[in-house]
Image (cartoon, helix red, strand yellow):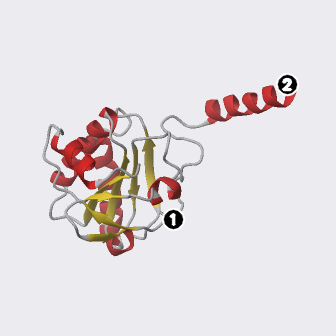
């Protein structure tokens, strides 16, 4: 019984000591973003590596209301960054099929125009430590390094918050 109590106590302390909006097992700021290649719901093949040189806003989603809210916020970022060196990508990281994801996207309050990728083998879920921690949003710099990330809290990852992080990276790149 004692080892179980110690394990649960450690988990409780770990959660308490985690910064707000972060989850244990999820990549942190300053780490290289794991690469992946997936197929978009529209059929094109998309690789994270192909966006080197751009700021990437990456959303990992399942089919749920919080993911719909976060995916809609990503659409605002996508619309606001047109013509800039920014790419917005959404990934259904829970392995749902094209039909299910298409039905989900058709229920969004806004039309999604950024690439929305299918991940039938849950590659991104495994790479990025998703699973229980969804939605999961990353801002990745022009060199493929994670510079900002939030998990599961729409207030901490609202469109204006994400835009501020994107703008910081665009400004710092312009100074170089």
| Local crowd size for mark 2, using a 10 Å CA cut-off: few (<14), some (14–19), many (≥20) | few
- Image quadrant in which the N terminus is located: top right
Q: How many marks?
A: 2
Residue at image point 42% right, 71% down: 143
Vertical relation: 1 (above or below) 72: above
| Local crowd size for mark 1, using a 10 Å CA cut-off: few (<14), some (14–19), many (≥20) | some
| Residue 59 in the image, given as x and y percentages of width and height | 35, 50
Horizontal side of 158 relative to 3 (left or right) equals left
Residue at image point 77% right, 33% down: 7
Tell me the residue that label 2 is attached to.
1
Task: Report how far apart the C-alphas of labels 1 and 2 lie in the structure.
Answer: 40 Å
- Tell me the SS state at disc 2: loop
Labels 1 and 2 touching (C-beta < 8 A)? no
Vertical relation: 70 (above or below) 176: above
Residue at image point 49% right, 65% down: 34
Q: What is the number of the mark on residue 32?
A: 1
- Tell me the SS state at disc 1: loop
Residue at the far right: name it.
Answer: 2
- Image quadrant in which the C terminus is located: bottom left
């Amino acid at each position: 019984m004692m080892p179980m109590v110690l394990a649960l106590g450690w988990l409780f302390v770990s959660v308490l000591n985690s910064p707000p909006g972060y989850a244990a097992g999820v990549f942190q700021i300053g780490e290289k973003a794991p690469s992946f290649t997936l197929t978009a719901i529209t059929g094109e093949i998309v690789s994270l590596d192909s966006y080197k040189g751009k700021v990437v806003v990456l959303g990992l989603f399942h089919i749920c209301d919080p993911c719909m809210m976060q995916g809609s916020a990503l659409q605002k970022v996508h619309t606001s960054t047109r013509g800039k060196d920014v790419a917005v990508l959404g990934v259904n990281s829970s392995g749902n099929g094209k039909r299910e994801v298409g039905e989900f996207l058709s229920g969004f309050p806004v039309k999604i125009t950024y690439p929305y990728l299918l991940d039938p083998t849950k590659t991104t879920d495994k790479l990025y430590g998703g699973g229980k921690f969804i939605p999961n949003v990353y801002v990745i710099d022009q060199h493929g390094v994670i510079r900002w990330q939030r998990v599961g809290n729409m207030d901490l990852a609202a469109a204006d918050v994400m835009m501020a992080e994107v703008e910081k990276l665009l400004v710092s790149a312009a100074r170089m």
